[in-house]
């Protein structure tokens, strides 16, 4: 009889424990969506911008070789340097993950040498060094993005066995991949212009043409991945449509791209406009709710 009298109370206790456990899981999921004071989506976006800035700064330096008095491009270069340093500081400040800290530290080490080249008086000798070393810095910044994505994935490991959360986790990780792809398009937009300038006669080397072609094909292929993403909203679709229009203007004139027939100012503006559009798309993906 004693056991029967305790049964309702036992059921109530189990019910309360279940509620607390469910609430804890929910809170755990929210906490795991944080990269320090940033969300993981935001951290992936910001770290992805670092890739783009390595190419934007390199592009600006090569442009200034023949346009030394262009104040707008000088401001672009200056602001890009400041933003690059500040964003790297913020990313480092907000992680406790050893792998990410190591990769951000490596970026800082490479950046010191690269910054010295950028701040030197523009010359063809220095420009060739920038062409030789910019990919190393780019790879280092890309490694940071990959590490942050891994950090996010690891943060969900303790919830892996919970079937009720598994689909949400899969969608979250898939969205992060899309943010990365979209963010990478910004970098490729700048890299395309950078290697356009690197193909001028005074700077061209045996790899220049191939690097330009690689940037073109990678950029072209990834746009289609974004077009069919399940995370697209009507607003994202509209922005992708505008981006396609801008990209098609370049595709239709691929011969001009290969044969150095664009004016320097044209390719500079087109790459910045393409970057702006991809930046908008990346920000919109960052804000998608799962």
Image: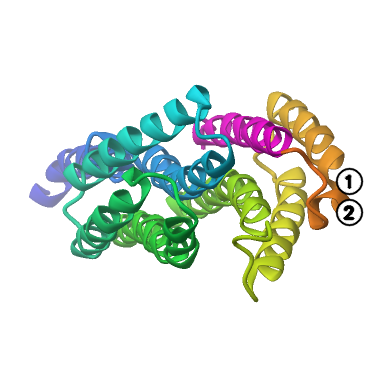
Q: Is residue 274 left or right of residue 122?
A: right
- The residue segment tinted magenta is 264-290
- Percent coordinates x, y for residue 67 in the rendering: 57, 35
Q: Is residue 18 visible?
A: no
Relative vertical location of residue 15 with respect to residue 188 in this rendering, above or below? above
Q: Which residue is mark 1?
A: 253
Residue at the farthest bottom position: 206
- Percent coordinates x, y for residue 180 in the rendering: 52, 50
**How packed is label 1: few (under 14 Cα within 10 Å), some, or many (20 or more)?**
few
Q: What scheme was used to colour the molecule?
A: rainbow
Q: Is residue 277 magenta?
A: yes
Between 258 and 122, the residue placed more toward the observer is 122
Looking at the rendered structure, the secondary structure element under dot 1 is loop
In terms of image quadrants, where is residue 97?
bottom left
**How packed is label 2: few (under 14 Cα within 10 Å), some, or many (20 or more)?**
few
Q: CA distance from mark 1 to mark 2?
A: 5 Å
In terms of image quadrants, where is residue 264?
top right
Query: Which label is found at residue 82?
Result: none
Q: Is residue 104 magenta?
A: no
Q: Which residue is mark 2?
A: 255
- Residue in the image at 73% along x and 33% along y: 266
Secondary structure that dominates the magenta span: helix
Does the residue at mark 1 contact the one at mark 2 (Cβ under 8 Å)? yes
- Percent coordinates x, y for residue 285 in the rendering: 56, 36
Q: Is residue 180 left or right of residue 108?
A: right
Q: Is residue 268 left or right of residue 29?
A: right
- Residue in the image at 26% along x and 36% along y: 86
Q: Is residue 280 visible?
A: yes
Between 188 and 154, the residue placed more toward the observer is 188
- Percent coordinates x, y for residue 104 in the rendering: 25, 56
């Amino acid at each position: 009889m004693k056991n029967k009298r305790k049964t309702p109370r036992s059921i109530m206790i189990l019910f309360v424990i279940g509620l607390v456990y469910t609430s804890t899981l929910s809170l755990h999921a929210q906490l795991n969506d944080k990269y320090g004071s940033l969300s993981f989506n935001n951290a992936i976006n910001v770290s992805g911008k670092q890739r783009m800035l390595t190419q934007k700064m390199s592009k600006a330096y090569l442009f200034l070789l023949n346009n030394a008095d262009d104040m707008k491009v000088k401001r672009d270069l200056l602001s890009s340097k400041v933003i690059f340093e500040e964003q790297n500081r913020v990313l480092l400040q907000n992680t406790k993950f050893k792998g990410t800290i190591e990769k951000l530290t490596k970026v800082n080490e490479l950046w010191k040498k690269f910054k010295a080249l950028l701040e030197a008086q523009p010359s063809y000798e220095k420009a060739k060094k920038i062409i030789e070393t910019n990919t190393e810095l780019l790879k280092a910044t890309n490694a940071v993005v990959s590490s942050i994505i891994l950090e996010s994935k690891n943060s969900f490991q303790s919830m892996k066995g919970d079937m009720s959360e598994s689909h949400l986790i899969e969608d979250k990780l898939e969205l992060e991949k899309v943010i990365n792809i979209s963010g990478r398009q910004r970098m490729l937009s700048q890299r395309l212009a950078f290697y356009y300038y690197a193909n001028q006669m005074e700077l061209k080397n045996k790899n220049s043409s191939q690097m330009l072609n690689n940037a073109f094909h990678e950029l072209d292929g990834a746009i289609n991945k974004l077009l069919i993403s399940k995370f697209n909203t009507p607003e994202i679709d509209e922005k992708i449509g505008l981006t396609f229009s801008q990209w098609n203007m370049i595709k239709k004139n691929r011969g001009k791209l290969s044969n150095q027939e664009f004016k320097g100012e044209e390719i500079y503006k087109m790459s910045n406009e393409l970057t702006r559009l991809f930046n908008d798309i990346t920000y919109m993906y960052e804000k998608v709710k799962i």
